[in-house]
Amino acid sequence: MSKLETNTIDTISGTNTLQVGDGNVATINLGKSGDTINIPSGATITNSGTANNFGSDNTPAFEAYLGGSGGQSVSDNTVTLVQANTEVYDTDSAYDTSTYRFTPQTAGKYFVYGSIQYEAGSNDDLIEDYLYFKLNGSNILETQTDFSDTRIRLHHVTGSMVVDMNGSSDYVELYGRINTSSGSGQIFESNTQYKRATHFGAYRILT
């Protein structure tokens, strides 16, 4: 095997295409472990073939849902942490099923999503419900649905947003609140009643 050592490879004057490999089917390696391959500002990478293991894979990522039967009993009109205790996946072990917090150790922008299935204690009992995302204990999203004029019993709420996370101490949580006229019997429904209707997840989309 021969070895070519040089500092610059350029096209012949008057041409603008540089071809690496022609004829034999081969694997072309660029660099070795520890090397940095720079793409300068203004340059473009164009792919007309198949890209394998190239670019972000949107991790860390997780999804968890409220498992078990009977739902999560909650106090009336009280902001309550959703106990999403059953993981579907958790690529970097960043979600804690005992604290219900997602604390990724890679900095970036994360798409965060959540859903809560609310149920009041009886028909025509549900006045309003809320969904919240909290970052480090502070509200970063709050939604409300008001049924004061036409009260119901069941309602499903979803929410999503992009959150900047520092990759060390930042954590995000899902909370809910349900306000009923009777003040009793209200729950966040679990997987047994409504499959994964109450769930929480996130994944990294940008650095």
Image: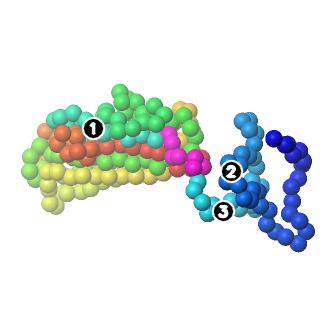
Residue under label 3, please give it.
46
Q: Which residues are magenta?
A: 52-60
Q: Name the residue at the left extreme.
A: 123
User: What secondary structure predominates along the stretch shown in magenta?
Assistant: loop
The spot of residue 74 in percent (x, y) is 22, 36
Which residue: 79% across, 66% down?
17
The residue type indicated by label 2 comes to: Ala
Sequence-first tag of 3 and 2: 2
Residue density around tag 2, few if under 14, some if 14–19, many if 20 or more, within 10 Å = few
Q: Quick one: 162 or 140, which is closer to the camera?
A: 162
Residue occupying image coordinates x 52% and y 50%: 205
The answer to which of marks 2 and 1 sits earlier in the sequence is 2
| Residue at image mark 2 | 26
Amino acid residing under circle 1:
Leu
Give the percent coordinates (x, y) of residue 136.
47, 36
- Residue that appears at 58% across and 54% down: 51
Residue at the location (19% across, 57% down)?
147
